[in-house]
Amino acid sequence: MARPTTKEELLHLSQANYKKLNDLIESISDPNKEFPEGTMNRNIRDVLAHLHHWHLMMLNWYEVGMKGEKPEMPAKGYSWKDTPELNKEIWKKYQKVDFNETKSLFNNSYQDIQKIIEKHTNEELFEKKKYKWTGTTSLGSYLISATSSHYDWAIKLIKKTLK
């Protein structure tokens, strides 16, 4: 499916890719198996932790932005150019969290993101510059990046490591 341009498409694709990701994970006999060398995220727990943390950042941006304030994006002390370094810090943060807890955190933050999508209209989601904090883009664009696009990345990464 093409990049969502409506609330209905965003809900559908975020839910479909979430389900695809979870189905893929369920099909793997050992979710703790290490991936081949060459990726920062070394197992499924790392991938889910990454997705969960980006959900949390999106939720924070939304909360701060909807109060009329400017969120620190992508995170305090990081610019978008620093995303690789930020991702390394995210990876480090979750190294002592086990797979089941990470999966639960991911599922819970996914639900929180879905609530945001559900409560907005098409216009609120996809009108560019609707909210000062989203700059020249739309709220929907940020939500696509935090959900369907990110889940697609995770699915491709996991499938690549299974070959």
Image (tube, rainbow, N blue to C red):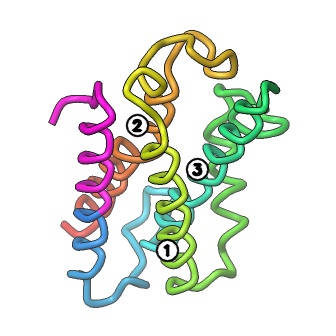
Q: Which residue is nearer to you in this view: 45 or 55? A: 55
In this picture, residue 91 sits left or right of residue 141:
right
Check residue 129 for magenta coloring: no
Q: Residue at x 30, y 71 (%)?
A: 22
Q: Which image quarter: residue 125?
A: top left
Q: Who comes first in sequence, dot 3 or dot 1?
A: 1
Element marked by disc 2:
helix
Element marked by disc 3:
helix
> According to the image, label 3 marks what residue?
54
Crowd tier of the residue under label 1, counting other residues whose Cα lies within 10 Å: few below 14, some 14–19, many 20 or above: many
Q: Who comes first in sequence, dot 2 or dot 1?
A: 1
At label 1, which amino acid type do we have?
A: Arg
Q: Is residue 75 above or below residue 38?
A: above
Q: Is residue 24 above or below residue 5?
A: below
Quarter of the figure that contains the N terminus: top left
Q: CA distance from mark 3 to mark 1?
A: 14 Å
Q: Residue at x 47, y 36 (%)?
A: 120
Q: Which image quarter: residue 58?
A: top right
Crowd tier of the residue under label 3, counting other residues whose Cα lies within 10 Å: few below 14, some 14–19, many 20 or above: many
In this picture, residue 70 sits left or right of residue 41:
right
Q: Which mark is residue 144?
A: 2
Element marked by disc 1:
helix
Q: Position of residue 104 (x, y in %)?
A: 52, 78
Bounds of the magenta segment: 1-18
At label 3, which amino acid type do we have?
A: Trp
> According to the image, label 1 marks what residue?
45
At label 2, which amino acid type do we have?
A: Ile
Quarter of the figure that contains the C terminus: bottom left
